[in-house]
Image (cartoon, grey):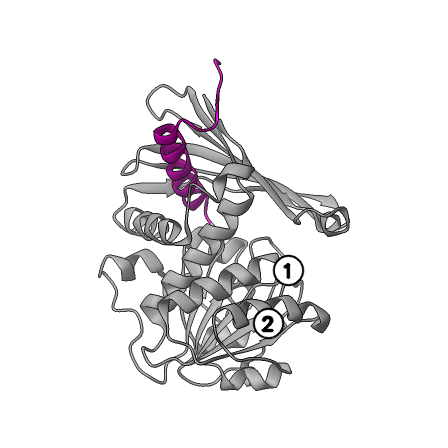
């Protein structure tokens, strides 16, 4: 078994690598060649969450699990709130193949999924990017979005506005004007990325203009919510996986209130493979419910392991 520690990941997997790997996962899921297993998620108290995401990708030859969760007290300890490790197994024998640091990989695969939704669903002429949330993941989201559209400026809102300074610095690196705005000015955005840990909707229907694409990336647990349910009722909704979307994703609330039928939610993989046309009009609101699936974690972890093997990096142990 090869151990690939967190410190090596940045040199092994680039954002472009993650985009290609996650797009391949979406396609494999659409073709029925890969499936996620049921998510196990437990609340530990004081906002802490711990759980497991796992799956089998027959096309990519990957079997494995990501273990980890969200620990909001970590920021005061100088480490990120999301902590995780990916374990890969031989799908034929079940023997352990690798143990891989999952922190950066989670950020890269989440940003890649969002960027794929923007690439496939946002209007080609989109020029204003709206960011709702300014935590650790937001910088990855901003950079990934900027790779797939030629944005001319960025507007952003965060519950704690003092945190927006870091996001503004990222926008400056990208050469994009940046402005902190109240939520009602999100109507100026052509694309809105939500990436918060909110327990209640902060983005309302009145904050979103016709033709906008939303990438809702923060809701991955029962009870969390970033977007008002009536907004999903107005939008054409896409997701990474239907089962997670209606149970732990942003769609859980709209479905529970009878505002959205699960049958109306489209797997983004179907757009990638051409089975669904995606956006069907310039005035249509499209919304991607990105819940984060285990197969995405396996794909980027497997890429890290392949690169580590090629370069003789990591620690090999007998098991």
| Residue 62 rendering spot, x and y as whole percentages | 36, 33
Say if the magenta span includes residue 305. yes
In this picture, which residue range is highlighted in magenta? 293-319
Mark 2 to mark 1: distance in Å?
20 Å
Label disc, if present, on residue 96 of the rendered structure: none
> In this picture, is 163 found above or below 295?
below
Residue furthest top as drawn: 318
Image quadrant in which the N terminus is located:
top left
Residue holding disc 2: 168
Q: Do the residues labelled 2 and 1 touch (CB within 8 Å)?
A: no
**Residue at x 37%, y 72% (from the top left corner):** 149
| Residue 139 rendering spot, x and y as whole percentages | 55, 62
> In this picture, is 118 found above or below 129?
above
Residue holding disc 1: 197
**Which one is in front, 140 or 242?**
140
Regarding residue 218, the answer to whether it shows in the image is no
Mark 2, secondary structure of its residue:
helix
| Residue 109 rendering spot, x and y as whole percentages | 45, 51
Of the numbered discs 2 and 1, the one sitting upstream in the chain is 2
**Residue at x 48%, y 74% (from the top left corner):** 175
Mark 1, secondary structure of its residue:
loop
Magenta portion: prevailing SS class: helix
- Judge left or right: residue 118 versus residue 78: left
């Amino acid at each position: 078994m090869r151990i690939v520690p967190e410190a090596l990941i940045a040199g092994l997997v680039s954002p472009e690598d993650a985009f290609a790997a996650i797009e391949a996962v979406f396609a494999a899921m659409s073709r029925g060649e890969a499936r996620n297993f049921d998510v196990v998620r437990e609340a530990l108290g004081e906002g802490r969450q711990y759980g497991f995401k796992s799956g089998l990708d027959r096309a990519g030859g990957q079997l494995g699990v990501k273990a980890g969760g969200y620990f909001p007290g970590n920021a005061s300890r100088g480490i990120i709130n999301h902590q995780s490790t990916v374990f890969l197994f031989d799908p034929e024998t079940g023997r352990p193949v690798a143990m891989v640091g999952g922190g950066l990989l989670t950020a890269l695969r989440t940003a890649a999924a969002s960027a794929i939704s923007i690439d496939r669903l946002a209007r080609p002429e989109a020029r204003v990017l709206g960011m709702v949330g300014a935590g650790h993941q937001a910088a990855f989201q901003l950079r990934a979005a900027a790779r797939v559209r030629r944005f001319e400026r960025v507007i952003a809102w965060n519950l704690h506005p003092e945190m927006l300074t870091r996001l503004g610095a990222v926008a400056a690196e990208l050469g994009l004007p940046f402005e902190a705005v109240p939520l009602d000015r999100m109507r100026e955005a052509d694309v809105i990325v939500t990436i918060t840990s909110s327990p209640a909707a902060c983005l309302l229907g009145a904050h979103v203009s016709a033709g906008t694409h939303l990438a809702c990336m923060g809701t991955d647990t029962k009870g969390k919510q970033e977007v008002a349910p009536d907004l999903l009722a107005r939008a054409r909704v896409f997701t990474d996986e239907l089962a997670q979307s209606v149970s732990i994703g942003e769609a859980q609330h709209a479905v529970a209130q009878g505002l959205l039928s699960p049958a109306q939610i489209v797997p983004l993989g179907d757009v990638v493979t051409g089975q669904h046309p995606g956006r069907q009009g310039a005035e249509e609101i499209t919304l991607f419910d990105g819940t984060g699936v285990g197969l995405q974690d396996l794909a980027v972890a497997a890429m890290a392991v392949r690169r580590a093997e090629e370069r003789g990096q990591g620690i090999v142990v007998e098991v």
